[in-house]
Amino acid sequence: MIPSEYFKILYFSLISFILVVFLFPVLIKKPIEFIVRKQYNLILISILIICILFIGFRDPWGLVKYLGDTRQYTKTFDAIQTGVKTEYTKDVGFYLYMRIFTLVTNVQVFFIASALIYCLLPYAMFKKHFGELANYVLIVYVISFSFLPFGVNGVRNGLAVAIFLWALKFYEKKWLMYSLMILSITFHKAMLLPLLAYLISFLVIKNEKKVLLFWVLCTPISLLFRGTLENFTELIFSSDSIIQDERASTYFSEESQKYKVSGQFRLDFILYSAIAIFVGYWAIIKKGFQNQFYSLLFRTYVIANGIWILLIYAPYTNRIAYLSWFLMPIILTVPFVSDLRFKIANNKQKLIYVIYGSLAFTLIMEFI
């Protein structure tokens, strides 16, 4: 078992080594289609194995400083297994899921199974909608800024997102898709936000320019009405409502202000989010990219991200931002691995910028 203090260093070293030493030279020299059929599958499998092994076989009692809430999940698992915890009033789906493992195995197997779900369910969706070129989407997904934290620290949210993405695989079977989306909410109630954004983009606002206008207006609104928005947000999470959660009360406490991601107007996070906004705008509006599924997810991302901007002052704001960020790899990558790539110049170079730009940003946020 890897000592927790070396966990991230080894993980990112291996991922970076594969992407730089093995993928980069091939990506420069050969067409995208050739890479997918040949070397690229081996590269993809290697990355998946690293992700699953590191996330699944991490130390269940690892230091909080390095492995976040892993120890807390282990304590909860033990409490359920020994009968100390018997009520499942919050995130019922997740705790029933955990309960199943407590009946038949140990916490390490629980983490391994969770890692498999977290990594493979999104890939199943990517594969369904984007074919073999989905491999690129998956690579950008696993090297994104949020992937490792929500696989190791925010397990409930990470699994909920994986189920939500898997639901999109069944886009043509609406009853199944919505059933799985509801299942994701039972794992983490915060998934109500992306579901709401999805429904708005699917049923109400089907125009990309309108959602972009909404996103642009969210920043000045957030700056001008900070106090009102903070009070409204605290009321939503703290009152007796469907999304009420006593854990959310810590998001607004004075003590929570000591955390790096709390109580600030995170311009860096907004600029990070804007990268996907720009790519989607460029692909759909400027280049006329016509892909109904991509446009739907782009609108969903813009709406969910705009709502986050309105809630940006809440402590742990990155957790709210993640409710849109998990769609970023799709928004960033699909235009360069789809039919649109035949209509633009230097599409492969742009894909290189997406992959290695994402990797560089993640490394900067983790180690600098």
Image (cartoon, rainbow, N blue to C red):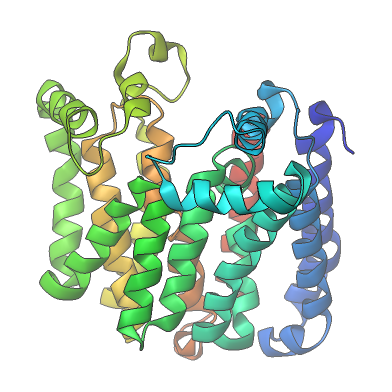
Instruction: Give the residue at x 33% y 8%.
Output: 254
Work out which residue is located at the far front of the displayed protein and give it: 83
Identify the image quadrant of the N terminus: top right
Q: Is residue 359 in sight in this rendering?
A: yes
User: Camera-side residue: 193 or 343?
Assistant: 193
In the picture, measured across the screen, residue 188 lies left or right of residue 175, that is right
Image coords of residue 346 (percent x, y): 56, 78
In the picture, measured across the screen, residue 263 lies left or right of residue 97, that is left
Instruction: Give the residue at x 79% y 68%.
Output: 23
The quadrant holding residue 119 is bottom right
Image coords of residue 190 (percent x, y): 34, 46
Identify the image quadrant of the C terminus: top right
Image coords of residue 159 (percent x, y): 53, 54
User: Camera-side residue: 119 or 45?
Assistant: 119
The quadrant holding residue 71 is top right
Rendered position, 311 above or below 98? above
